[in-house]
Image (cartoon, coloured by chain):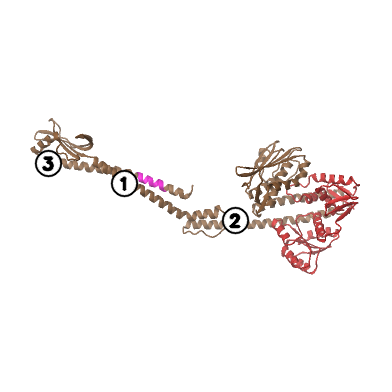
Chain colours: A red, B brown
Amino acid sequence: MNVLIVEDEKSLALEMDEFLSNEGFIIEHAWKKASAEEKIFVNSYDFVLLDLGLPDGDGFEVLKQLKSFKDRDDAVIILTARSAVDDRIKGLDEGADDYLPKPFSLNELLARMHAIIRRKHKLEKNEVNIHGFLLNIQNRTVSFADERLNLTKKEFEIFNYLVLNKNRVVSRMSLTEHVWGDILEVNSDSNFVDVHVKNLRKKLAAVNPTDWFETVRSIGYRINC
Amino acid sequence: MKLQVKFSLYNAVTKIAIIVILGTIILFSLDRIAYNQLDNRLIKKKGKIIKNLNDAEIDSLLSNEQTFTDYNILKEEFIILTDIPDNEVDSDAKIITEKREIEGDIEFYRILNYKFLYHTNWYKLELGESMTALQSIKNSIRFYMLVVLFVSLLVTLLTDFAFTNFLLKPFYLIIDKKINKVDDPTHFNYQNIRTNTDDFKILDNSINSLMRKINTLFALEKQFIANVSHELLTPISILSTRFENMLNTPNIPVEHENKIFASLKTLNRLKVIINSLLLISKVENNQYLKTEQINIKEELNDIYDDLEDRILDKNLTYKTDLKNDFNFIGNKALLHTLLINILNNAIKYNNAGGEIIVKGEIKDHHYNLTIKDSGKGMSDELLNNAFDRFKRGNTEENGFGLGLAIVQSIAKFHKIKVEIDSEENRGTCISLIFPGTN
């Protein structure tokens, strides 16, 4: 899948590049509004990661132009440090698929991209197999050997997020932010995530060993596969 | 007190004072003039009588004394001549006011008393003039004077009031339209109020120019906030993505991994602080709309879902008692933030196994929402600075001390009054007093 990163901040764009390349995405860059417009005119992308504050104009104009092309369904995720509520509403109104305020976690970006992929392509196979556990993203259920596990909403969210970011350390912080949202002043470093993870692990381990579900010292968790 | 009322009161007081002074002067001098005239007449009359005096006249006067036939019918004046013993000293005429009974009627008279020698015989001459007429004239003059003065007082007061009203009208318009009714300088009406009073023109223009200044400052601040967001959050973004990528590098030493993670945590802290400060300044800068219908009950349920884990984690009892259904027009996201901050504090500063009681009711035409916890409470010193930025209570949980500052700015933005009542080791009770009942 090819991704166009429209971002004038080079170091940020390159970090995103590194992360998404590892995930198997093919990355192209546009540093300015003009080159972004040129690129979207020539190619179509699976994802356009769009920064709003570009040196030669507003990212919204790129979005508008992209939406004016017919028969294109490039998914657009707005990435911006302008965290105004208006911008969020405006962006989604103009046809952006998602909106992620800076600074964001790369894990979160990936989770959002996966959500869009599922939504856009209506994957026939909405199930992910992790060591025999079948994760049904559509129905939000987890089963093992045709037996459904009784997970709570939050436990499913955590599992799903870890699976999306498999083979990667997911910090408690980013997990909290994903599951509980960006709640201001709620301390993201407390141990209540651990409680949920502990319960989740207990439920999974009750049916099959979960040595692939790793606790990474004081940082967070990782699902290996 | 309004300027116009003050003017009118001042006018009334000065006019009443003038009337009182003028009235007493007129009445006093009226008295003096009347007596003077009466006395002059009496003296003139005496001179005439003395000059024309002869034996026949004396006899007639002396005999009249017994009968009073010479009195005119209205008994306005009299002449009495009496024979008095000799050896009297010649004296000046004396004038006195005295009550006299004449033919059964008692009246006040101005009486001239004069003793004189005529052909070796001493006589006393008394000339009297009734004061009744004078008194009635005086009374009527007094009455008319009062009426005239009173009417003129009333008329001038009314005209004064009307004129100051006319004069001050532009002033009140300026006060009302340009000061009282302005709560958002971005929608200020710069049109001048029509007046030909220079002072008001100056006032109007100064308010306009002040407002222009405030407006520019507002715009600048907005711009500044936007810039700060961008300039501060972008580097944080770069750092955090870089650290994340580093964490994903295979085979990095454990101690490095921990340090990278610690850096990520620090960055996150920075992010939360910046976002909180930005939120406060944006709220204080009126950059949010207040147009959404918010149901407090639904909002509280949502928040409970978000916080359920922490409540259960601390084994807290959470009770709600919402007596009235309450809808509020405001900004949903902001109100959510406000309530979640209060409830989060109630959890954070609570003791394990404690309780949180949320109560909603209409009190004195205001909807009151109180959130009470049985936690650590605040000392008086802490309570005084509770709303200050970066103040926080002693707790193992590390917040940033911005929660209540956020609460206050959002509450102010929605015109919600916040009251905190807290006792150390007993708990804190926060009351939100909403501006209406529905």
Is label 3 in contact with label 1 (beta carbons under 8 Å)?
A: no
Q: Tell me which numbered mark, 1 or 2, is placed earlier along the sequence.
A: 1
Could you say where residue B323 lies in the image, as x and y percent from the top left? 67, 42
Pick whichever of labels 3 and 1 is earlier in the sequence: 3
Q: Position of residue B124 (x, y in %)?
A: 15, 34
Depicted A175 relative to depicted B114: above or below: below
- Judge whether A197 appears above or below A60 on screen: above
Dot 1 crowding, Cα within 10 Å, few <14, some 14–19, many 20+: few
Q: Please name whichever residue, A18 or B127, is drawn nearer the observer in this view of the structure.
A: B127
Quick check: can you spot residue B224?
Answer: yes
Classify residue B176 as left or right of residue B13: right
> B409 or B399, which is in the foreground?
B409
Q: CA distance from mark 3 to mark 1?
A: 42 Å
The residue to which callout 3 is attached is B51
Whether B16 is among the magenta residues is: yes
Question: What label does residue B144 carry, if any?
Answer: 1
What's under tag 2, amino acid-wise?
Pro
Q: Secondary structure at mark 1?
A: helix
Mark 1 residue type: Tyr
The residue segment tinted magenta is B11-20
Mark 1 to mark 2 CA distance (whole Å):
59 Å
Q: Chain of mark 3?
A: B
Q: Secondary structure at mark 2?
A: helix
Q: Characterize the magenta stretch by its predominant secondary structure.
A: helix
Indicate the position of residue B72 as horizontal and vertical percent values. Answer: 17, 40
Mark 2, residue position: B185
Residue under the image location 14 percent in, 37 percent down? B69
Name the quadrant containing residue B25. Answer: top left
The answer, for residue A84, to whether it is visible in the render is no
Image quadrant of residue B53? top left
Q: Amino acid at mark 3?
A: Lys
